[in-house]
Amino acid sequence: MKTATIPALRVEPKLREAVQSVLSEGETLSSFLEESLRANIERRLHQQAFIARGIASRDEAKHTQEYYSTDDVIAELANIYQQAHQKAL
C-alpha cells in the first residue's frame, strides 16, 4: 500500500520544544505525531461506540419501560467486581 502524507502542522515554538523534550530515545517527531494520531483516532472511535451504546440503551429502556435505580446498578457492579477479584486471587 502506498503511504500518504499529513499536511504540515504549524505550531508555536514552545509546543515544538515541549514535544521534542518528551521524545524517547530514537523516537522521531514524525513517529510521535503518527502515534498521537492513532491514539486519538482509537479514543474517538471508543467514544462514538460508547455514545451509541448509551443511546441504544436509552431507547431500549423507553421501549420496555424497564429502568434501574442507581443503587441497583452500583450494587450489581460491586458484585461483578467482587466475583472478578475472587477469581483473580
Image: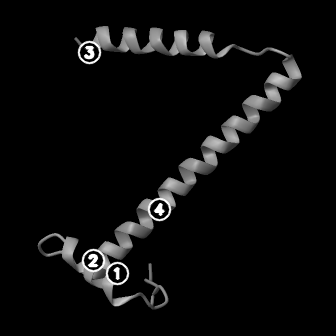
Distance from Cα at disc 3 to Cα at disc 4? 31 Å
Q: Position of residue 47 (x, y in %)?
A: 58, 49
User: Can you say which quadrant of the picture contains the C terminus?
Assistant: top left
Circle nearer the N terminus (4, 1): 1
Answer whether labels 2 and 1 touch (C-beta < 8 Å): yes
Nearer the viewer's eye, disc 3 or disc 1? Answer: 1
Q: Is residue 8 above or below residue 83?
A: below
Q: Which residue is mark 2?
A: 18
Circle nearer the N terminus (2, 3): 2
Distance from Cα at disc 3 to Cα at disc 1? 43 Å
Q: Which three-letter amino acid code belongs to the residue tagged 4?
A: Asn
Q: Which three-letter amino acid code belongs to the residue tagged 2?
A: Ala
Q: Which three-letter amino acid code belongs to the residue tagged 1?
A: Leu
- Residue at 46% in and 12% down: 78
Q: Which residue is mark 4?
A: 40
Q: Which residue is mark 3?
A: 88
